[in-house]
Amino acid sequence: MDDRSWIFIEDRVNNPYFEKCLNDFLKFAYKKKEVGSRIYCPCRRCKNSERRKEETVRAHVTMKGFLTTYTNWIYHGEDPWDFNQENMNNGVFRRIENDDMNELIHETLGRTLEENSNINLEELRGACDEETNKFFKLLKHAETELYPGCKNFTLLSFVIKLLHVKSLCRWSNNSMTILLELLKEVFPENELFPSSYRDAWKIVKDLGLSYHKIHACPNDCLIYWKETEHETFCRKCGTPRYKQIVKQSDDSSEQANKVPAKLVRYFPLKPRLQRLFMSSKIASLMRWHEEERIKDGKLRHPADSLAWKHFNDRHPSFASDPRNVRVGLAADGFNPFKAMNNKYSTVHWKHADWEI
């Protein structure tokens, strides 16, 4: 099923084409499953978080719609890396030369690969500032073979793919650590190989995947932030902020370290945007919507839309500076004929469960 345009159809009820495509999807999902078993429901409400029977999945998808961001059906038996048949014929994992680790590292530094090619690395090494040390550490991991003679993976590319699998398959941190301990025995020659989930995270954290932990009410009433930062009970429903965990001591019971009942993870957008503007080439592309876009009244770019113009009318001070970014668009401002690419998307990584 290479054509997946049907998942965007809004007129779904009594639509023969949609019903045919949905039936093909369900046949694919149940290809290796027993009749009557449950599968993850890909409707826009369940979002692959609930297992349901076939008829329920059919009803949900028809009434609520198929999750439009779910184009690689990893929860229903598809290759987690790529559904493109050419890549599947070449194997699940791509080789080192196709992993773009060097491009990823240079983008993390805040410059394009072409700009960094003109940098004197010895001068950078002599500067010894924090950013430079991070850069050379990432380069070292990107050049370290997973084991002597390995041609398919470096340490960095392998750890990134392993963390990707952890996220896709919803592994726990403990299961990840157990696997890494086993692999550490398999690759004893690589002294840098992580032996725990925490060590693996340390290898990739300098790529800019950090986040802030914020305590939240278990009933989703509020987050403990700013004026509620120091409160211990939800001001709306009265639910305790912390789990009631008590440890026993020799003399009496004393409260253990406070464990939040619920955590949310905030991924700061500002550092990501700052990194993009550090590159003169990318910065000019982000201003393309104002400086180079053809303004003849035709709809070629989101900046030509009525919604964009309405926003400009309501916020003239914001609109006056073309560097300002409208977060509602994944690739806001970019030249759609050249630079629009998912690596610039603010929601490119799915790693919400990578907790330290």
Image (tube, rainbow, N blue to C red):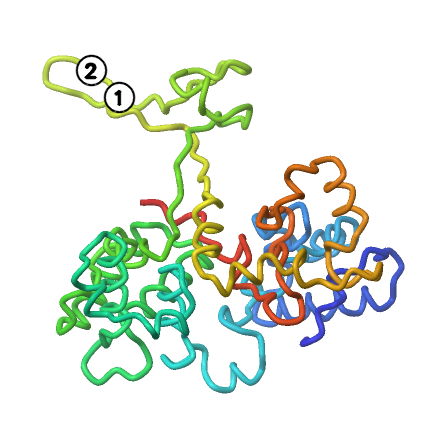
Q: Badge 1: how crowded within 10 Å, few (<14), some, or many (20+)?
A: few
- Horizontal side, residue 240 vs residue 35: left or right: left
What is the x, y in percent for residue 229?
41, 21
Task: Kindly identify the residue that appears in the image at 36 percent across and 50 percent down.
Answer: 172
Using the image as rendered, state which of residue 22 and residue 189 is in the foreground: 189
- For residue 38, say whether it is visible: no
Q: Quadrant of the N terminus?
A: bottom right
Amino acid at circle 2: Ser
Furthest-right residue in this view: 14
Farthest residue, direction left:
250
Name the residue that disc number 2 marks. Answer: 253
Residue 66: x and y in percent read 71, 56
What residue is disc 1 on? 246
Horizontal side, residue 4 vs residue 134: left or right: right
Circles 2 and 1, Cβ within 8 Å, touching? The answer is yes
Secondary structure state at the residue bearing disc 1: strand
Q: Residue at x 73, y 50 (%)?
A: 60
Check the image and report above or below for 65 versus 252.
below
Mark 2 / mark 1, whichever is N-terminal: 1
Q: Nearer the viewer, residue 256 or 31?
A: 256
Q: Mark 2, residues whose alpha carbon is within 10 Å: few (<14), some, or many (≥20)?
A: few
Q: Secondary structure at mark 2?
A: strand
* Residue type indicated by callout 1: Val
The mark tally for this picture is 2
Q: Residue at x 22, y 69 (%)?
A: 140
Question: Residue 109's quadrant in the figure?
Answer: bottom left
